[in-house]
Every structure is written in structure tokens, then in C-alpha cells.
Image (tube, grey):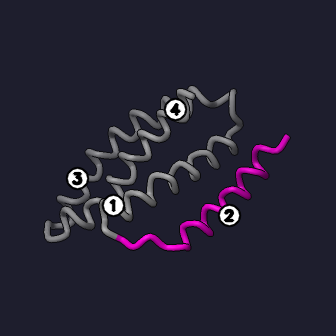
Amino acid sequence: MRTIVLLVLSNVFMTFAWYAHLKDLRSAPVYVAILASWGIALFEYMLQVPANRAGYGTFSLGQLKIMQEIITLSVFVPFAVFYMGQPLKLDYLWAGCCMAGAVFFIFRG
């Protein structure tokens, strides 16, 4: 559970580091957006590295990666809709279905 919580929190920071500048720093010079993103990404790594260290052994490397991708999609969709004001699309559902297939294959025994 610790691994999943840390990965969710790290993904929140990652998503903001990667995309929030498109809304909040659109008129700022690119170097400002880069520095702000790096600053946010530091917190992402402070959570992501311990998450992967805690989870490795309980989960395989492939399972950690697929878990990360599922969490990324789960964090990204609400971010895109509520923070960035993007329309909710059926494409997110189809992407989630593809990810569910990836979960099936990587976690099957």
C-alpha cells in the first residue's frame, strides 16, 4: 500500500511538472517554465524513488512500471479535465481499457 500511495503522490507532482506550465506560465519565458518544472519534479522524485524501492521485491519491475502507468492515467484525466479545462473524452475510457489489458498480462500468475 505504501508503494501505491507514494506513486500516486509522485504522479500528482509529475503531472504538474510536465503540464501545469502550459496553463500557468504560458506567457513566461521557456527557461522560467523549465526551472519551475524542475523544482516541482524534485518533489516527484523524492516520492517516486522511495516508492519504487519499497515496492521492488514485492512487485516485479514490469509490475511497478504498469502500476505507474495506471496511476499516471488515473491522475492525468482529472488533472486534464478539472485543472486544464479539457473536455472529458471517451478516448480516456478506451485508453483505460488498454491499460487494464496490460495489468492483466503483467500481473497474471
Marks 1 and 3: CB-CB under 8 Å?
no
User: Closer to the camera, 96 or 9?
Assistant: 96
Marks 2 and 4: CB-CB under 8 Å?
no
Mark 1, residues whose alpha carbon is within 10 Å: few (<14), some, or many (≥20)? few
Residue 107 falls inside the magenta stretch: yes
Q: Tell me the CA gap for discs 3 and 2.
A: 34 Å
Q: Tell me the CA gap for discs 1 and 3.
A: 24 Å
Q: Quadrant of the N terminus?
A: top right
Pick whichever of labels 1 and 2 is earlier in the sequence. Answer: 1
> Considering only vertical position in the picture, is 60 above or below 57?
below
Q: Which residue is mark 4?
A: 51
Q: Position of residue 13 (x, y in %)?
A: 36, 46
Residue 35 falls inside the magenta stretch: no
Q: Tell me the CA gap for discs 1 and 2.
A: 23 Å
Count of marks overlaid on the render:
4
Q: Classify residue 97 by image quadrant.
A: bottom right
Q: Secondary structure at mark 1?
A: helix
